[in-house]
Amino acid sequence: MALDKAPALEALQLSEPELDDLLREFVELAEVEVDSIRGRLDGKRFDGLDRRAHSIRGMAANLRLDLCRNRASRLEAALTSHDANRAAEAMLFLEQAIDEVRRAAMRG
């Protein structure tokens, strides 16, 4: 599935190269947050993890990345309820969506 950049281009009034720069920055920041979540989730330490997922959700929403936003929202809910199994599954789906953004940004 290819990422549709049109909603972000229109809403943010950016050129495609500018949006691609923002998408690459999103990928970098989201990966840092996911790595942090994974590291703490392995130790079953949930405190503050929902805020990290919320941060990813907010960044994705600002860039009109609906798939990432939805998947980060699911991760946030799993972390809020301290459900490690659901969170692990949600993280895999979120990582797939982040990979899609990475590919779209690289294609230009």
Image (cartoon, rainbow, N blue to C red):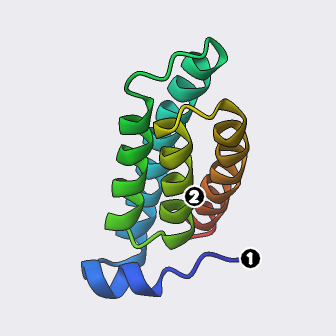
Callout 2: SS: helix
Question: Disc 1 or disc 2, which is closer to the eye?
Answer: 2
Residue drawn at point x = 44 percent, y = 30 percent: 49
Residue count near mark 1 (Cα–Cα under 10 Å), binned few <14, some 14–19, many ≥20: few
Label for residue 1? 1
In the rendered structure, which amino acid carries the disc numbered 1? Answer: Met
Disc nearer the start of the sequence (1/2): 1
Q: Which residue is mark 2?
A: 71
Q: Position of residue 2 (x, y in %)?
A: 68, 77
Q: State the quadrant of the N terminus.
A: bottom right
Q: Amino acid at mark 2?
A: Arg
In the image, is 68 to the left or to the right of 22? right
SS at mark 1? loop
Furthest residue to the front?
A: 81
Residue furthest out toward the left: 13
Could you tell me which quadrant the C terminus lies in? bottom right
Q: Residues within 10 Å of mark 2 (few under 14, many from 20)?
A: many
